[in-house]
Amino acid sequence: MESLYDKYGGFETVSKVVHGFYDKVLASDSLKPYFEGMDTQRLIDHQTKFFCDIMGGPVAFEGRTLAQIHANMSVTESAFSEVAELLEETFEDFGVEADDIGTLMGIVSDVKEQIVQ
């Protein structure tokens, strides 16, 4: 069975999706404050590896847990929901099929308790 990673073009496509996603996130007045003072390129690199991993690609995501990363960020329910909406919108922008978006958003939903405080 073909992985989502391979189905959508591998690392190059995942990287473009993540860059597009962060363009949307950083354009949001309500989300931008969460990223002030962060090394955005490093964050994008980590997020790209994370998505490659959950899409079945050869890049294994390693590092701190999502709970550790978000521990001091005070992420709210509404911020998480907005990020999820922007992510879903980005997948749609890049032609990801609805069933595959559902699979990926299910994974995102499953990690919500590690992110929202």
Image: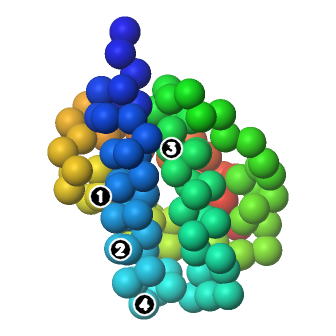
> Would residue 53 be visible to someone looking at this image?
yes
Q: Which residue corresponds to mark 4?
A: 29
- Give the percent coordinates (x, y) of residue 11: 43, 41
Q: CA distance from mark 2 to mark 1?
A: 8 Å
Along the polypeptide, which appears first: circle 2 or circle 1? 2
Q: Secondary structure at mark 3?
A: helix
Q: Which residue corresponds to mark 2?
A: 24
Tag 4–tag 3 contact (CB < 8 Å): no
Is residue 117 shown above or below 53? Answer: below
**Disc 2 packing (10 Å; few <14; some 14–19; many ≥20):** some
Q: Amino acid at mark 2?
A: Lys
Q: Which residue corresponds to mark 3?
A: 51
Q: Which residue corresponds to mark 1?
A: 90
Q: CA distance from mark 4 to mark 3?
A: 25 Å
Give left or right: position of 73 versus 55: right
Tag 2–tag 3 contact (CB < 8 Å): no
Q: CA distance from mark 4 to mark 2?
A: 10 Å
Q: Amino acid at mark 4?
A: Asp
